[in-house]
Amino acid sequence: MKKLFRFGLGIALLAAGFSACSPARTATQDGVDKVTVLMTDSQVSRIETGDQPLYNEQGSLDASVNFARAMQHNGMVGIQAHVRAESDKALNDAAFHLLEEAFAVRSWQLHRVAVPREIVEWGERTGARFILITAHDGYVRTEQNFISRSAAANGAGAYAEMSMTAMTHTRATYVRPSTPVKEFSDFHVALVDTKKECVLFAKESMENRDPALNTTAVKQVQDALMEYFR
């Protein structure tokens, strides 16, 4: 019943809210000033054997701290609050779900992404209209692993490189005619308007850099935000 109700209102809501959910807009056009960051914890892995990732607690903690700091001092939009989503399981799950949905469609289809009720209601309770949801993951190969995998890749002529995805906790494989990547960092952001219940923009930044370093966080936050908050 709930899905049918929302679908039935789709045309009317689209007419009223499309201007704020259509692609190629900016924060100024959408009336975005200060935002609340809802940050999921970074997931950083260390690869020692083959392509098997092992969760790295210290690397994940360092990355979480560095990305939180980079978001707070991004230089493009004021952050009025910074909340760790992990402290609320339902909210954390809703954040991951929204990111999965936002990156499963093309940018011009973001108006079709349904914002989870947990996020809308949390925004209403806290007075946060604009919520910027983030997710980050990555990996670092040990020097020995990188050397051995590079040698194997050179012998085979092509290499299946692994890309970690924190949102789904799965691995995607791409064949690249080059040596394997030693370091990889993947950062996702999605901005939600809880009043209009829509996703205003979503952006991903991928870098072959150490995911736990502060310089990586600063660069990826800038890359992810500059297109919309310019």
Image: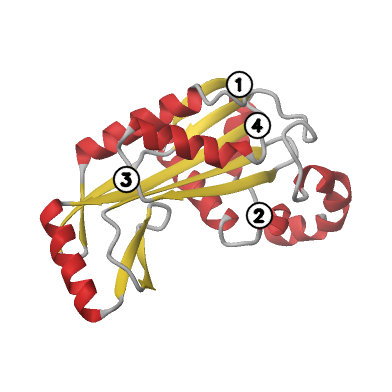
| Earlier-in-chain disc, 3 versus 2 | 3
In the displayed structure, 4 sits above or below 69; it is below
> Residue at the spot x=31%, y=72% of the render?
160
| Earlier-in-chain disc, 1 versus 2 | 1
- Dot label at residue 151: none
Looking at the rendering, in which quadrant would you find the N terminus? bottom right
Mark 4–mark 3 contact, CB under 8 Å? no
Dot 4 falls on a residue whose secondary structure is strand
> Residue 55: x and y, percent?
22, 49
Q: Which residue is mark 2?
A: 113
Q: Which is closer to the viewer, label 1 or label 2? A: 1
Q: Which residue is mark 4?
A: 130
Looking at the rendering, in which quadrant would you find the C terminus? top right
Q: Which residue is mark 1?
A: 78
Q: Distance between the Cα atoms at labels 3 and 1?
A: 26 Å
Dot 1 falls on a residue whose secondary structure is loop
In the displayed structure, 153 sits above or below 1; it is below
* Neighbours of disc 4 within 10 Å: few (<14), some (14-19), many (20+): many
Left or right placement of residue 88 versus residue 97 in this view: left
